[in-house]
Amino acid sequence: MRVWAALRASSAEGRFEALHTTGLTALVGREEELELLLRRWSRAKSGEGQVVLLSGEAGIGKSRLTAAMMENLTAEPHTRLRYFCSPQHTDSALYPIINQMERAAAFAHADTAQTRLDKLETVLAQSFTPPQDAALIAEMLSLPNDGRYLTLELTPQQRRQKTLEALTAQMEALSRSNPVLMIFEDVHWIDPTSLEALGRVVDRLRTLRVFLIITYRPEFEPPWIGRPHVTAFTVNRLGERDTAAIIDRLIGNKPLPASIKQDIIERTDGIPLFVEEMTKAVLEADGEEASARAAGSIPSPFVAVPASLHASLMARLDRLGPAKEVAQTAAVIGREFSHTLLSAVSRKQEPELQSALGDLIAAGLLFRQGAPPDATYLFKHALVQDAAYGTLLRKPRRALHARIAEILENQFAEIAENQPELLARHCTEAGQKEKAARLWGKAGQRSLERSAPLEAIEQLKHALGQIARLSPTPFVRREEIKFQVALITPLEHVKGYAAAETKAAAERARLLIERAEALGEPPEDPLLLFSVLYGIWVANNVAFNGDIIRELSTQFLELAKKEGTTAPLMIGHRIVGTSLLFAGQVAEGRVHLCEAINFYDPVEHRPLATRFGQDIKVAILFWRSWVLWILGYPDQARADAEHAVQYAREIGQAGTLLFALAATSFTHILCGNYGTAKMQSEEGIPLADEKGILPHRGWGLMNQGCALALIGEVADAVPMMASGIGIWRDTGGTLLLPGYLTNLAAAYAQLGRVDDAWRCIREALTAVEKTKERWCEAEINRVAGDIALKSQTANAAQAEAYFERALAAARQQQAKSWELRAAMSMARLWRDQGKRQQARDLLAPVYGWFTEGFDTLDLKEAKALLDELNA
């Protein structure tokens, strides 16, 4: 077995891989499912990677089936990787992967950092891991670099991406030596970053010798269904015959009245775990009663079947005497726990503790890997842990959570530092609200810094939930403002800039700041207020209302001038410039954007990316690229677009890169660089999917559709653009829609769907009048004129009227590139009408104005048309 295997093939004691096979001699009623798994394994071994999605309710036998699969492969050479997701770690990035790596390397609590690095290096060497990947994996495990690896100068997002790439590369390397069996258990509890990593594996293993089994409960919706190498099936309940067979195997030669057996069958309803546990409860009770009858103390002839799984587990725990208390303590720690931590929390002498653990293992309720004090234990099933946890009354349960939190903080410093969310969860359950809030907030900020927005949202919500239960002291009010403001940025990315939840978060933050100022407690960090005002501006900008965003941006800049520091001034000029751009005051917008970029200092302002959604310089560059193209400077526009993407890659923050790829894709579309636009969209859409950032998926699809339409792949382009527009609207966005609806209209017209084209044009023109988003008003009218000429009864007069409106709008906005396009459309119409001199007189001065960009598509077409008219 290789490094990633949870245990070695030679390990005999308490193997986690024996999960759900202990106490049951054979797999019953799952022969067809097992045969399917084995067939998929055969295909995977030959290099045709396979994924099986195994769905079923709790206790139905998913893990039992995977264990049977592993038993069938015992004699075959292969590498085994097994991961366990946990309900206590749904917000802990990469928890199942980190946990598996630590087990594979056999980390012990007493190990020094150097020892852990040595152990890790030993196992990584088996898969010939490159030094850079080894450094990333060590960092993922929170191990300090003692000099054996190069120091990696990476941004948080770059570090995250390269770590995920390193994990995928590990799987690829292992598959070159042996076929790989990967099992991801209980994915309904997976954290978002691990889900992203798992998605990469699903995509990559298609041509590798890898077989991946993913188990989950029905409430989880796997995003991979429908792919050709993915098979999904549901594990159903057993029939009465199979249920009876399980009971017979468990009771062996012991007598069991038919009525009791039938009672078990009826109450367990075909769920194997329930069958096993209730049967054991009956057998154990009968054994006790038989002994008592022999002593003459109990006349009863037989025991009753427990009413439920919970009742049977409670009964079994009660019969374990002192072991019950150990099970309860362990259940509070979690489904998986170390001997060292349990020993510290239980405060029992080692012989007593080991005896109790031995009883729990013998009863089949716990599994053990390794030997004490370095042993790790796992409850047989999450339902077993739940039952043990449920036997505790509220007061002792809270005391245990408090004790665990204290011990983690004092004796397991590396866990407390690297998993603040784990410590926060115990403090929450212990009723330590203020401490829990602080720790949840710390975890949320840490997730933001590590480009994990989904985890950050949940952790910050937990922090705010705890704060809501505290008395409103000045300190509590400051903490609430800090966490509420921090929540805005990840919500913008995940839910959408104009989504109701995002807007509510920003308005709530503003209200909190206003209340604090009224109490004479203004935030110590003045940027908090600007972060909130920016969030409110963004929400109104994306759900576009021209009057409101101009007013908000002007207020922001005035407040920034009073503040006098560079960051607010930079952002103020940036949002004023952007607001003017969309309102059609393009030249004025350019002045403010140029002013904004003059304030930018990378040392001071790069860290603001996590607070304002993206790096400010990158944002200025890509919006200025639009401004420059519209004003007639295509070379400068391309330079800004290329610089924006390059700088975004250097920064490595997901929100910044996604924004840069999307916005500059449209710059390239305007410049006629359709291949570049398509390539950037193809990069951005999967990245948006990985991050769960829906708005950028919509924007990317709109751009990709535009590029496809313009290179002639119109049939594919139309549904892509329509899908992107739908997603953008679903996130509350209306900004940019007039421009993209215009492109969709042009594509419809190419397909001969003129009615659909007119519908899009009318919608775009209505949006311009209603919201005052005028930056593309000229282009909407120009395309409307082109559509008028493509109608069944071509209407030249109508087309000319639209072209006149396009020219007027472009001239009013000093939008030379839009004016050039409108002049070309009008010139072609007049040429076809025999008005060649009028056409030349219109187009020549517009073309003659340009001083750059003569290799761009529009200017080349204008030159060709002029040459034709001159001839």
Image: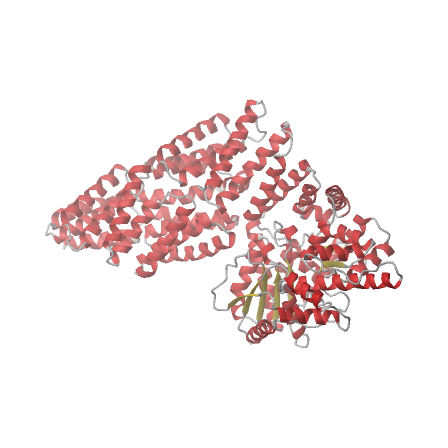
* For residue 658, side relative to residue 361 (left or right): left
Residue 175 is situated, as x and y percent measured from the top left of the image, at 60, 70
- In the displayed structure, 224 sits above or below 407; it is below
Residue 184 is situated, as x and y percent measured from the top left of the image, at 61, 62
Q: Quadrant of residue 576?
A: top left
* For residue 588, side relative to residue 842 (left or right): right
Residue 367 visible in the current orientation? no
- In the displayed structure, 179 sits above or below 195; it is below
Q: Quadrant of the C terminus?
A: bottom left
Q: Quadrant of residue 277?
A: bottom right
**Residue at the limit of the structure toward the left, as seen here:** 834
- In the displayed structure, 525 sits above or below 162; it is above
Return the residue nearer the eye: 289 or 128: 289
Residue 585 visible in the current orientation? yes
Return the residue nearer the eye: 106 or 390: 390
Return the residue nearer the eye: 591 or 226: 226
Residue 334 is situated, as x and y percent measured from the top left of the image, at 70, 52
Q: How many marks?
A: 0
Q: Quadrant of the N terminus?
A: bottom right
What residue is rendered at 56% in x and 60% in y? 198
Residue 145 is situated, as x and y percent measured from the top left of the image, at 68, 53
* For residue 222, side relative to residue 370 (left or right): left
Q: Quadrant of residue 441?
A: top right
- In the displayed structure, 222 sits above or below 471; it is below
Return the residue nearer the eye: 359 or 700: 359
What residue is rendered at 66% in x and 65% in y? 265
Is the image coloured rainbow, by chain, by secondary structure, or in one colour? secondary structure
